[in-house]
Image (cartoon, grey):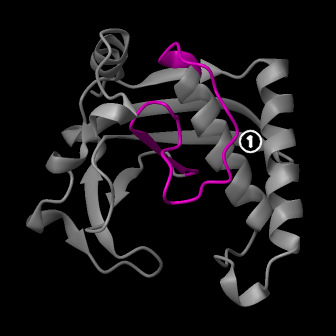
Amino acid sequence: MTNAVTLELTAEEMDLVDWCVFVRLEADSEKPASSLFKEPDERATRVKQYAAEVATARYLNIGYKYSDSDFRNYDLEPYAVQVRSSYYEMPHLITRDNEKPGAYVVGTVRAQNYVPYEVTLWGWLPFHLCNKPDRWREGPHYPGYWSPVTALHPMRILRAQIANGDYRTANH
């Protein structure tokens, strides 16, 4: 049994996700193709990314501000929170050696015709607990440290820590 939290996205949140995806894909269309991360379905990838970020922001009671996901920034500024997303029912939280300290969250997004309607937030870990040698996998697309959902902390703990002022980017 996990401590997962499932949220249904509101119509406003679905519209926000759609807008974020549109802006990101427009920005990407102006970049050289060689500089872009290649996914079989880039739109679906962006839908799950932004839907998980929006749902996490709502659950943590912090405002969501669109980011182009520049790796120099955190997903949920001004908090040191990174959000990973998946369409898999029991995902892993995947991290790599060169990532920033902070809280890492993983969520599963359910969508139909590119419209996300539900996000399950499986849990989170502080970065220093993510990269354990026994979790390393080469993986076909994502070599890194794969933390199973059974290793994650409940989302309610992160929400309490955020409310207490922890994980502000100024502290990381």
Whole-percent x, y for residue 117 in the image: 74, 30
Q: Main secondary structure of the magenta part?
A: loop
Q: Is residue 4 magenta?
A: no
Towards the viewer: 77 or 89: 77
Towards the viewer: 65 or 6: 65
Taking the spot 49% from the left edge, 39% from the top edge, the residue there is 107
Magenta span of residues: 58-87
Alpha-carbon neighbours of circle 1 within 10 Å: few (<14), some, or many (≥20)?
A: some
Whole-percent x, y for residue 90 in the image: 41, 46
Asked if one can make out residue 87 in the rendered structure from this viewpoint, the answer is yes
Residue named by callout 1: 111
Whole-percent x, y for residue 141 in the image: 48, 78
Asked if one can make out residue 115 in the rendered structure from this viewpoint, the answer is no
Q: Above or below — where is 21 with respect to 58?
A: below
Whole-percent x, y for residue 138 in the image: 30, 81
Circle 1: element type: strand
Quarter of the image containing the N terminus?
top left
Q: Above or below — where is 60 with respect to 112?
A: above
